[in-house]
Amino acid sequence: MKMVWAIVRSSKVDEVARCLKSIGVGGCTVSRVRGYGDEWHVYEPLIHGGQDKLEMIIRDDQVDGVVKEITEHACTRLDGDGILAVFDLRSVVEIRSQEEVASFLPKREVSQL
């Protein structure tokens, strides 16, 4: 399993989320974030809520598709488009049952939107 963490422009979140759902991503946490990167001149718009963080746990076989969808649909080719990272997960524990979940993410059929 992998965790994908992406910072994208707030104006692109709905588009990215629709695309992720269309390829079978079962869930995504979205949080408003503030900050800046290498481009200091884009700092001011970001402080005013210009970006969101998307976090999702996915199967290993979904990584390439998820990265492709996020990078294609979040890109404006302007400074401040964001960043994406993929992390290996050592374990996932379901809080309700307090059990480690070996196959947390079953393969789901993709429904048409």
Image: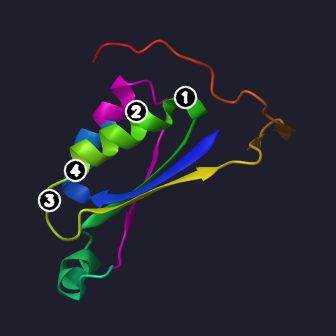
Residue 73 occupies quadrant: top left
Q: Mark 1: give few (<14), some (14-19) or many (20+) Cα within 10 Å.
A: few
User: How far, Cα to Cα, is label 2 from label 1?
Assistant: 8 Å
Depicted 49 relative to depicted 69: above or below: below
Dot placed on the residue nearer the N-terminal end, 3 or 4: 4
> Mark 3 or mark 1, which has the lower sequence index?
1
Q: Secondary structure at mark 1?
A: helix
Q: How is the image coloured?
A: rainbow
Amino acid identity at mark 2: Gly
Task: Say which mark, if any, is on residue 65.
Answer: 2
Q: Which amino acid is tagged 1?
A: Asp
Q: Which residues are magenta?
A: 18-36
Helix, strand or loop at label 3? It is: loop
Q: Is residue 31 visible?
A: yes
* Foreground pick, 97 / 113: 113
Q: Residue at x 78, y 31 (%)?
A: 102
Give the secondary structure at mark 2.
helix
- Which class describes the residues within 10 Å of circle 2: few (<14), some (14-19), or many (20+)? some
Q: Residue at x 24, y 87 (%)?
A: 40
Q: Which residue is mark 3?
A: 77
Residue drawn where x is 69% and y is 30% of the image = 104
The label shown at residue 12 is 4
Check contact, mark 2 vs mark 1: CB within 8 A: no
Q: Nearer the viewer, mark 4 or mark 1?
A: 1
Instruction: List the residue tagged with mark 1.
Output: 61
